[in-house]
């Protein structure tokens, strides 16, 4: 008999991409499996999940607004409403299992599943666990983590370190450096730095690169630069003026960007860290300091402590980032050592590991 699975969560690519990767892996192993995604209305999952070919329903849920307490007035009502919506979804869909990937929708969906005796599974992509996942851990069958050492957040006997499911287009890419550089119309004889601040961009990174562009070009370096929305116009103008800078608001073909890069400058969201580990490119992380529980710093620190990456604080990016990038670009031995460390850490079959374990549990 075919199984019906709900996948709940979203809010960022770091939650949505693993969710889709897990669904794809389960589908590959059990093609008859039926999926329903549950997300937060107005969040990016409402667009990205249908693009990946899956059905999604949105619920009225939001998180606590820490910057303005006034904006939280309607929150209790939203939470009550979301639980009623979830109850209706369960009545209609009747899931055999529920997977939570983090994000606002995770809590009401998994909480209701646990109350109904439906097996629940959690995937925690960050090195510092989110609040909802910690609260749901006790009632979960299994907790899949992107990194080891998560016993401080979850019951040790429920943890399975699987790594973070990365988009197959990146995990399975076999593009040569030459082809990738030709794609961006760049010089194969120069050291290439990929600069990426997530889909929304990172102002501190962009400002540092903008201010230090002349220095970088003077060292015979070239850039593939995903700006996001912040300073996109200024970066595009710089790219138009210099052949050694390819700049765009968004890179659709990230597999080419990684293949072209000799090193990377990036934020430290869980998926960025997982992708960089899989492609094994030396990186300088500039963690976003306002991420929940400062989890990006925890993600970056884990690799930096192993000598697999460098860490620059957001507030120090303007004065330190370009200098550190030039030093790393000029130190081939250090980059090779970082590459080797990362290659040992990258897990390419994370989605299959999660899928196998879930199917095994619900087939008993």
Image: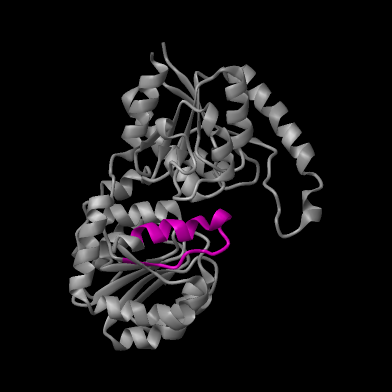
Report the residue at 70% width, 29% height from top. Answer: 83
Q: Tally the marks.
A: 0
Q: State which quadrant residue 259 falls in.
A: bottom left
The answer, for residue 237, to whether it is visible in the render is no
- Asked where in the image residue 62 lies, by quadrant, the reply is top right
Residue 347 position within the rendered picture, expressed as x and y whole percent measured from the top left: 28, 45
Q: Residue at x 34, y 83 (%)?
A: 216
Residue 277 % position (x, y): 30, 55
Seen as rendered, the residue at the extreme top is 1
Left or right, 319 with reference to 105: left
| Quadrant in the picture for the C terminus | top left
Residue found 72% across the figure and 60% down from its top: 67
Q: Is residue 313 magenta?
A: no
As drawn, 278 above or below 84: below
- Answer whether residue 291 is magenta in the image: yes
Give the residues in magenta. Answer: 283-303
Against 80, residue 296 (above or below) is below
| Image quarter in which the N terminus is found | top left
The answer to whether 344 appears left or right of 352 in the picture is left
Colour convention of the picture:
one colour
Q: Residue at x 61, y 29 (%)?
A: 111
The one nearer the camera, 294 or 180, is 294
Residue 103 appears in the rendering: yes
């Amino acid at each position: 008999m075919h199984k019906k699975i709900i996948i709940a969560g979203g809010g960022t690519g770091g939650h949505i991409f693993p969710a889709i990767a897990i669904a794809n892996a389960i589908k590959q192993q059990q093609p008859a499996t039926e999926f329903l995604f549950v997300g937060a209305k107005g969040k990016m999952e409402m667009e990205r999940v249908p693009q990946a070919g899956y059905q999604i329903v949105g619920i009225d849920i939001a998180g606590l607004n820490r910057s303005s307490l006034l904006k939280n007035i309607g929150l209790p009502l939203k939470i009550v409403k979301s639980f009623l919506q979830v109850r209706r979804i369960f009545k209609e869909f009747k899931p055999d299992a529920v997977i939570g990937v983090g994000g606002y929708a995770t809590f009401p969906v998994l909480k209701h599943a646990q109350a109904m005796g439906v097996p629940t599974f959690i995937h925690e992509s960050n090195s510092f666990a989110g609040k909802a996942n910690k609260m749901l851990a006790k009632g979960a069958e299994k907790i899949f983590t992107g990194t080891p050492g998560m016993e401080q957040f979850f019951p040790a006997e429920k943890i399975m370190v699987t790594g973070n499911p990365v988009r197959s287009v990146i995990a399975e890419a076999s593009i040569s450096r030459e082809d990738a550089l030709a794609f961006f119309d760049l010089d194969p004889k120069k050291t290439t730095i990929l600069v990426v601040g997530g889909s929304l961009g990172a102002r501190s990174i962009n400002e540092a690169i903008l201010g230090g562009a002349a220095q970088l070009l003077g060292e015979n370096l070239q850039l593939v630069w995903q700006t996001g929305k912040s300073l996109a116009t200024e970066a595009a103008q710089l790219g138009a003026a210099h052949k050694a800078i390819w700049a765009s608001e968004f890179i659709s073909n990230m597999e080419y960007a990684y293949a072209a890069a000799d090193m990377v400058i990036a934020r430290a969201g869980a998926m960025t860290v997982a992708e960089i580990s899989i492609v094994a490119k030396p990186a300088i992380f500039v963690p976003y300091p306002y991420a929940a529980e400062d989890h990006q710093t925890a993600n970056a620190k884990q690799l930096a402590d192993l000598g697999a990456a460098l860490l620059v604080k957001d507030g120090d990016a303007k004065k330190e980032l370009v200098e550190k990038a030039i030093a790393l670009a000029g130190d081939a031995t250090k980059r090779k050592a970082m590459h080797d460390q990362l290659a040992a850490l990258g897990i390419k079959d994370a989605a299959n590991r999660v899928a196998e374990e879930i199917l095994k549990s619900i087939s008993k």
